[in-house]
Amino acid sequence: MAVRRSYTAIVERNVEWSGEFATEPYEAAWASEAIFFVRALEVSPDFDGGLAYVQISADGIHWADEGSEFDLPTKKNAVTFCKVRHFGGFLRIRGVTGGKTSLVVLVSLALKE
Amino acid sequence: MINLQAIDPRLSRFDPLERVFFYDDFDEGIRGWSELIGNYEHSLDSMLPEYSDMRPPMLSNLSMWDTGTAGSMEGSYALKLATRARAGSLATSIKRQTFRRRGQIQLECYFTFKPEASELRLSLDDVRAFGVLFDLQDGMNPEFRWMPHLRYLNAVEDEMINRWQVKGQTRPFHNIGDSGETVSHFHLGPENWDFVDCPAQTLCYNEIATKMNWHYLKVKLDLAKRRFIGFQCNDLVYAGEALKHISIPAMPNLNCMLNTAFWVETNRDKRAFLYVDSVLLSGVF
């Protein structure tokens, strides 16, 4: 029996999100399921949460909301995630942090055939 | 030379040395080509900033906004390196191996490169450079770590260059963290590149950013003599004097290292892409 191929890409590492953010386009047409994990490496003292939205694209240039959304982590080393299926070719997440608050993140995209 | 065509028609487009060390067709997965990261200690903040964001590789089926999917040269998927949309951004992918004998080795691959098709114009000078490098160290009683680098400098700002270059010197080493156990040096900066003594080579770009033509590249090294012997890209063959490479004293824990890496650098605030259909490393060992 062949095992299912899988791959985890670190799409952001040690990057500060303050205000609007979007991850780089990631191609995953070979995969049928994905999970975005967001881990907070640092959180500003007044950070009171925020939302991330999954987006999909046919070409990696023009994006549409996929419909899934999830909370950003609010404590150091906390992890939040979002499962996605049936997404076509390109994936990313976008969102915004509230006010002048910020968090430093490590974003993993776990993909599986 | 053995008749590889009789074994696998996919190999008939390569000219390997007597043994195949690895053959990676990216239709079969990522096959050990990971993101390159700098050394760190205790915190990611201790990394040299140039190494902090070298982007994860991906498997691409070359889908374009105007014509849909092209697929790779041989199948559906190619390894894709994608920079950020910021001039000077690099994307790098590395495969880490060791060798068992200091013989000759040869890398062959089929590749193509393009800027992101985010503008409806020629975009010929939007990719600054792409290249391949080796990171090598002798085995028993090592004297040297040596790093042959070969890059195609496509354009610098508004000037087309279309020349092959090699690198003979890295930047100074830095201590990382506070234990004294970890060091780091950045070797992909814009400095210390020398033109190879061969003509300019204009690679087939094919007019718009969504048309990709695949190119052949071959690079040959001698591990025993520590010589960067030569290379070939399509119909350009360099077989002159051994090419310059970075050479530094051997390091404590790198014996028999045989690392191979590809990278691409953007010339504009626009993503640059390098695609590799397949790569074959062969040798005499």
Image (cartoon, coloured by chain):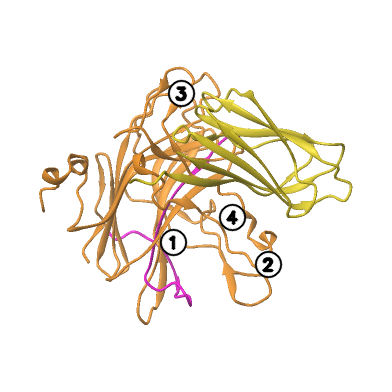
Chain colours: A yellow, B orange
Please, which residue is most extreme toward the bottom here? B141
Q: Which residue is tagged 3?
A: B64
Q: Are marks 4 and 2 on the same chain?
A: yes
Q: Which residue is tagged 1?
A: B168
Q: CA distance from mark 4 to mark 1?
A: 20 Å
Closer mark to the observer between disc 4 and disc 2: 2
State the residue at coordinates (55%, 38%): A34
Residue range highlighted in magenta: B241-269
Q: Residues within 10 Å of mark 4 (few under 14, many from 20)?
A: some
- Whether residue B92 sits left or right of residue A78 in the image: it is left
In the picture, the disc for residue B51 is 4
Q: Is residue B209 visible?
A: no
Task: First in sequence, mark 4 or 1: give its number.
Answer: 4
Vertical placement of residue A69 versus A108, above or below: above
- What's the chain of the residue with tag 3? B
Q: Which residue is tagged 2?
A: B42
What is the x, y in percent for residue B280?
Answer: 29, 50
Closer mark to the observer between disc 3 and disc 1: 3
What is the x, y in percent for residue A110?
Answer: 55, 44
Task: First in sequence, mark 4 or 3: give its number.
Answer: 4
Q: CA distance from mark 4 to mark 3?
A: 30 Å
